[in-house]
Amino acid sequence: MNNIIISPSILSADFVNLERDIKRIEEAGADWVHIDVMDGHFVPNITIGIPVVKAIKGITKLPLDVHLMIENPEKYIGAFAKVGADIITIHYEACEDTLKDNIDLIKACNVKAGVSIKPKTSQERLYPYLKDIDLALVMTVEPGFGGQEFLHHCAMKIPKIKELVNDEFIIQVDGGINNITSKICTSLGANSLVAGSYIYGSSDIKASINSLKNIS
Ligand code: DX5
Ligand code: ZN
């Protein structure tokens, strides 16, 4: 259960006080900063873009874990890498036919490459790409918004992916993660947890991160 990478989603932070809210998670022991980029096409919401990622890079030493919920990711991967993304995760559903090219593009930028699947997408779609990527992101809600309820059936994808990868490989889950659902995911083999509303909605951010890491 050790060495779980905690990646708080700043979608639930106070955007007027983003620097303060990123320092808060940094001081509380977060490992990465999860940045949800939405384009209003792939998902019905619009959030953060390249200039904001650049600004965040200037105020934290934590690796930036950029989750691209966008169509045509090939147009933007280079720009996100240039402003300091350390991990770029794209969606299988956004670029089924050009996924390998996009993975190669991310790797050519010297950035860790992740691929995410939505709740209705089978984990089998990822199998041909597992050898090429560093991270598989299993969405446990429909992407688009924070604060949704964890979809239990999605977690069953985790052990199936785990069987095919080594210990270095990162299996990340995102959506509805709290102190209970985190344990379901880590016991099934997840080693990275994204959490937005659970962490930022807590009155004790350090305690909430520790509870995800299973430290009391
Ligand atoms: C949803 C995003 C998530 C979101 C998680 O599309 O990818 O990262 O911020 O929020 P919670 O933890 O509140 O479900
Ligand atoms: Zn996310």
Image (cartoon, rainbow, N blue to C red):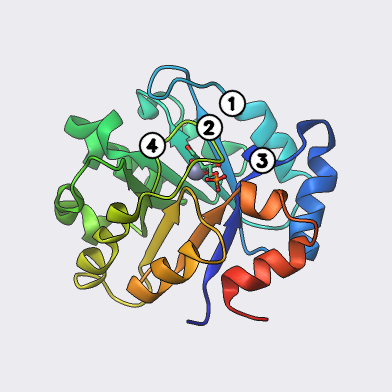
Q: Amino acid at mark 4?
A: Glu
The tag earlier along the polypeptide, 2 or 1, is 2
Which numbered circle lies on residue 47? 1
- The answer to whether 210 is drawn above or below residue 108 in the figure is below
Please tell me which residue is depicted at 38% across the width and 36% down the height of the picture.
142
Query: Circle 1 sits in a helix, a strand or a loop, which is it?
Result: loop
The three-letter code of the residue at mark 3 reads Ser
Q: Residue at x 66, y 40 (%)?
A: 12
The response on whether ligand 1 sits within 8 Å of label 1 is: no
| Residue that mark 3 sits on | 12
C-alpha separation, residue under disc 2 versus residue under disc 1 = 6 Å
Kind of residue at badge 2? Val
Q: Earlier in the sequence, mark 4 or mark 1?
A: 1
Query: Residue 106 location in percent, x, y?
Result: 39, 43
Q: Secondary structure at mark 4?
A: loop
Would residue 142 be found to the left or right of residue 154 on screen?
Answer: right
Q: Is mark 3 within 8 Å of ligand 1?
A: yes
Three-letter code, disc 1 = Thr
Residues tagged 2 and 1 counted as in contact (Cβ below 8 A): yes
Q: Earlier in the sequence, mark 4 or mark 2?
A: 2
Numbered mark located on residue 37 in the image: 2
- Cα gap from disc 3 to disc 4, whole angstroms: 16 Å
Q: Are marks 4 and 2 in contact (CB under 8 Å)?
A: no
